[in-house]
Amino acid sequence: MPVDEYFTEMHAAWERATAAVPETERGEMIGPFIDRYTASARPVDATGVAVEDTAIDGPHGPIGLRTYTPEGPLAGSLLWAHGGGFLSGDLDMLEGHMVSMELARRARVAVVSVDYRLARDGVRHPVPIDDVHAAWNWWSDREPHRGLPRAIGGASAEGALAAAAAMRLRDEGERLPEALLLAYPWMHFPVPALTPSLSAEMTAVPWRFDPLGLEWAVRNYVGRTSDLPPDALPGAGRLDGLPPARIVVSEYDDLRPSAELFERQLAEAGVAVESYVAAGMTHGHLNHPASVPEVGRSLDFLASGWAAS
């Protein structure tokens, strides 16, 4: 199907807003533009969900956390990592705050959103994974969700953090989560190529990932682009023994081949996996309002992960 009308209208608004701006200066304007465009989705509806900010001691210093606890009996718990290419994003972005709120409400699970250290100012792999792991250890055995099914998840590059943390739990003999929830994850470098048909369909999609930009992001996160640690982008790691996975794939996304290859790799390793292709959506679609129908359907697919565990 074509790119969803929501994104078509947003892209048209972007072209109008930047018509007089040189192409070389547009990149730094994308984030603020999206924030303005999605402003109507803020504040996120918190009806029936208690939200609390806290912090814990981690191996590299304090780790900020935001917890979401829905009213009534709980079905389980989730640790969630917002996206941002390892170097951007925060707890307030829709992909962090809105997704955590909606999953708490839709799945009736307690959620903790992790303010892991970003790959800035010398921070590199495995520090963000260490933060996610420490947050998991703090969160996973707390009341009132102790003993209930647990999940770990993340979006985009931070899907790699969630999967890497699960790999570490497996390797260190700790209790694994019952589900791995991933939204349009980035799991490989280099990223597999788009199919010719999808490449042709995406020619009109703005804000694309280019190979040199992805190479820069890997170098910024790991410090190099060769001999990568197997947990940096977990498609290169050992995947057997991981928990059952649910993967949301954006239809029009340069990282779609990575998400789909990771699904095939999990299945090949004997891991139960299901995926949902979000029709008409571009990368990062969970960083947009839940009122967009396909965003809501993606959230419902992730929320149903506890019923399958």
Image (cartoon, helix red, strand yellow):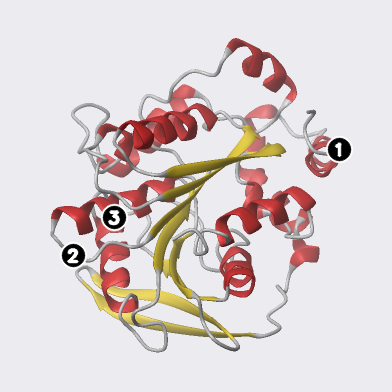
- How would you rate the neighbour count of disc 2 (Cα within 10 Å): few for under 14, some for 14-19, many for 20 or more? few
Residue at the (35%, 82%) spot, across then down:
146
Q: Residue 87 location in percent, x, y?
A: 42, 50
- How would you rate the neighbour count of disc 1 (Cα within 10 Å): few for under 14, some for 14-19, many for 20 or more? few
Q: Residue 58 location in percent, x, y?
A: 24, 73
Of 38 and 301, the residue lying toward us: 301
Residue at the (42%, 76%) spot, across then down:
65
Q: Name the mark nearer the viewer: 3 or 1.
A: 3
Would residue 118 appear left or right of 169 to someone viewing this image?
Answer: right
Q: Earlier in the sequence, mark 1 or mark 2?
A: 1
Whether residue 123 can be seen here: no
Compared with 42, 120 (above or below) is above
Q: Residue 261 location in percent, x, y?
A: 43, 28
Q: Amino acid at mark 3?
A: Ala
The quarter of the image holding the C terminus is bottom left
* Distance Cα–Cα, label 3 vs label 1: 44 Å
Disc sitting over residue 166 in the figure: 3
The quarter of the image holding the N terminus is top right
Q: Name the mark nearer the viewer: 1 or 2.
A: 2
Question: Which element carries disc 3, helix, strand or loop?
Answer: helix
Would residue 117 appear left or right of 200 to someone viewing this image?
Answer: left
Residue at the (31%, 69%) spot, across then down:
136
* Distance Cα–Cα, label 2 vs label 3: 9 Å
Q: Which residue is mark 2?
A: 174
Question: Which element carries disc 2, helix, strand or loop?
Answer: loop
